[in-house]
């Protein structure tokens, strides 16, 4: 079975823009994949994970950067930009392969294999889970109710960055860049990270503002649009619509009609499985003694949707993963699957994914002119979201009836500032376009740097907006309070949060539960106008109407007391 170790290498050669390499048949491991090689791989993973997590924590607590930005910076520090752990002697042990037919030997640097293994896992499991989780967080009924502002901001927030950044790329890169590269750069910056702005707003105790409510809806909407636009873009690439195909790009179709026909067929297949097969399987597991298998079943469906979207429809695999999460949400109201997958992915695989991105970033290749491009792209990334939100609130103010509260410029600024972080979705799109040879190494590094800077700029801009905000004048609800229930060392704080989730899910339907890295979670209760957050080190925090919070606490106390009363010696 040692030949299986060759699979990541063969699949990932395109990620580094290498020429096609045809490996001989019968190539087996001679001495490269022995116990020593495996031990080196374990040490490499431990080093990457430890460095990424520690540097991420340092960036968060000392510089107040979002965790995602900190962990990417950790990867950059460990990569060729500074420490370059891939070149350490302990990771330079050669992996030797022998062609069993000719007897010829091939030698590869071990660290190259290590990075490839991490990339192949990230490209499937981690990236797939991120979009699957986004699908699980998408409440279609809530999206229909977010109103004109969030809808317009979501649509414009996806389209305007493509136009602005694509145009900027034409101005700066016209001598070297193709039309595909210009559009690809725009798509990278079209999506907004859902988790980053919500985490910042909740940490600032500003989730009750209507601009914050609009942010959640708009961020999800422009994520959906960005994923669909990426799939359409890749299909158009296959047909050569944007000119000559990049070297190494896989183009199975030459007809636009045939390409869209495949996409249409794939959507029919995915929707059929999602509406009939997936619910049947999950319900069967829920009604039997196999509830513990809901998580693995959801994981299998996620991978199937991911692969079918790409192999059948020519779509981006993340589109399939997103729809898998969307369909799963409809049948798993208690989040059985997320409870199984989220801790492992968020605590281990996500830091490895972000660290591996940093490992591929070599800041040394950026010249002075490249940093000028970074600066202009950052400005365009910020301005495009602000333009989209101000345009959206402007249209909303024009259509408002008399007596309705108009959006202010300050609310628009806060709304726009919270839409600026690109985060994980932008990184996923950049990685896909890099692996497809749409953008080269330099543009990839530039994109990653700008994405990091957007996550840094957003908290700074929000803090300026919040400092000027009079909460009593802007808030729609003067009775909003924030209550920190604190830590519960005996029963466990996370266990208490799970109890609250179970009690409330048995009594009412909550719109969404958003999970972040580091185990933080947010429960959104539309019915009660309350949000409940769990944050390790801070405890359980409730924000919203004071009376409703008191009712929820009483409800939880009664439920726990009822369960405890069932305990008896007999």
Image (cartoon, rainbow, N blue to C red):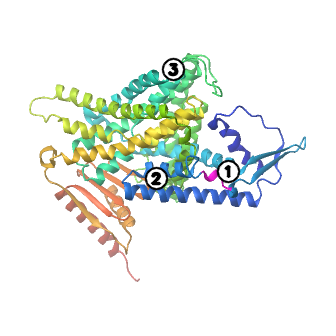
Q: Main secondary structure of the magenta part?
A: helix
Is 85 magenta? The answer is yes
The CA distance from mark 1 to mark 3 is 35 Å
Label 2 neighbour load within 10 Å: few <14, some 14-19, many 20+: many
Residue 180 coordinates in the image, percent (x, y): 52, 23
Q: Which residues are magenta?
A: 84-88
Which residue was labeled with disc 1?
Answer: 111
Q: Is 559 in front, or is 123?
A: 123
Labels 1 and 3: the sequence-earlier one: 1
Q: Is 87 in front, or is 519?
A: 87
Labels 2 and 3: the sequence-earlier one: 3
Q: Which type of secondary structure does the marked residue at label 2 adopt?
A: helix
Is 229 magenta? The answer is no
Q: Residue at x 36, y 33 (%)?
A: 379
Q: Residue at x 25, y 34 (%)?
A: 147
Q: Is residue 55 above or below residue 190?
A: below
**382 sits to left or right of 285:** left
Label 1 neighbour load within 10 Å: few <14, some 14-19, many 20+: many
Q: Which type of secondary structure does the marked residue at label 3 adopt?
A: helix
Residue 76 coordinates in the image, percent (x, y): 53, 48
**393 sits to left or right of 245:** left
Name which quarter of the figure residue 23 lies in: top right
The reply to whether residue 358 is visible in this rendering is yes
Which residue was labeled with disc 3?
Answer: 179
The CA distance from mark 2 to mark 3 is 40 Å
Q: Is 547 in front, or is 104?
A: 104
Front: mark 2 or 3: 3
Name which quarter of the figure residue 239 lies in: top right
Q: Is 46 in front, or is 290?
A: 46
Front: mark 2 or 1: 1
Which residue was labeled with disc 2?
Answer: 338
């Amino acid at each position: 079975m040692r030949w299986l170790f060759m699979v990541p290498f063969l699949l990932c050669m395109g990620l580094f823009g290498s020429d096609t390499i045809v490996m001989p048949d019968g190539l087996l491991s001679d001495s490269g994949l022995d116990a020593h090689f495996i031990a080196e791989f374990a040490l490499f993973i431990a080093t990457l994970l430890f460095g990424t997590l520690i540097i991420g924590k340092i960036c968060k607590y000392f510089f107040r950067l979002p965790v995602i930005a900190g962990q990417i910076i950790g990867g950059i520090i460990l990569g060729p930009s500074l420490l370059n752990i891939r070149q350490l002697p302990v990771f330079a042990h050669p992996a030797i392969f022998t062609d069993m037919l000719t007897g010829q030997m091939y030698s590869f640097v071990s660290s190259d294999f290590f990075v490839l293994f991490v990339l192949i896992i990230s490209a499937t499991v981690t990236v797939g889970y991120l979009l699957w989780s986004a699908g699980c967080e998408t409440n279609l009924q809530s999206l229909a109710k977010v109103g004109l502002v969030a809808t317009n901001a979501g649509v414009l927030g996806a389209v305007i960055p493509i136009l602005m950044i694509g145009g900027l790329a034409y101005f700066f890169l016209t001598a070297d860049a193709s039309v595909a590269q210009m559009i690809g750069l725009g798509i990278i910056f079209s999506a907004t990270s859902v988790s980053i702005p919500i985490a910042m707003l909740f940490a600032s105790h500003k989730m009750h503002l209507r601009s914050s409510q609009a942010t959640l809806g708009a961020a999800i909407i422009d994520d959906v649009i960005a994923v669909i636009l990426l799939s359409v873009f890749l299909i158009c690439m296959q047909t050569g619509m944007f000119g000559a195909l990049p070297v190494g790009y896989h183009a199975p179709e030459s007809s636009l009609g045939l390409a869209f026909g495949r996409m249409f067929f794939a959507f029919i297949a995915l929707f059929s499985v999602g509406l009939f097969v997936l619910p049947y399987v999950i319900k069967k597991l829920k009604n039997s003694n196999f509830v513990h298998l809901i998580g693995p079943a959801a994981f299998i469906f996620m991978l199937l949707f991911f692969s079918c979207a790409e192999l059948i429809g020519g779509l981006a695999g993340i589109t399939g993963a997103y729809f898998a999460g969307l369909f799963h949400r409809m049948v798993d109201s208690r989040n059985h699957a997320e409870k199984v997958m989220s801790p492992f992915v968020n605590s281990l695989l996500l830091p490895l994914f972000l660290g591996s991105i940093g490992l591929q970033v070599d800041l040394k290749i950026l010249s002075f002119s490249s940093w000028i491009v970074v600066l202009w792209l950052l400005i365009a990334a910020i301005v495009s979201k602000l333009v989209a939100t101000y345009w959206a609130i402007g249209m909303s103010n024009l259509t408002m009836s008399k007596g309705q509260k108009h959006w202010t410029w300050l609310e628009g600024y806060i709304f726009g500032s919270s839409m600026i972080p690109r985060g994980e979705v932008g990184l996923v799109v950049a990685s896909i376009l890099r692996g497809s040879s749409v953008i080269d190494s330099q543009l990839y590094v530039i994109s990653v740097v700008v994405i990091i800077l957007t996550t840094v700029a957003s908290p700074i801009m929000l803090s300026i907006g919040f400092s000027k905000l009079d909460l009593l004048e802007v808030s729609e609800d003067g009775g909003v309070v924030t209550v920190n229930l604190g830590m519960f060392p005996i029963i466990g704080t996370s266990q208490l949060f799970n109890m609250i989730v179970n009690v409330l899910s048995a009594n009412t339907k909550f719109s969404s539960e958003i999970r972040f890295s580091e185990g933080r979670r947010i429960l959104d209760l539309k019915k009660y106008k309350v949000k409940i957050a769990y944050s390790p080190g801070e405890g359980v925090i409730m924000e919203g109407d004071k009376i409703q919070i008191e009712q929820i606490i009483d409800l939880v106390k009664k439920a726990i007391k009822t369960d405890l009363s069932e305990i008896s010696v007999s």
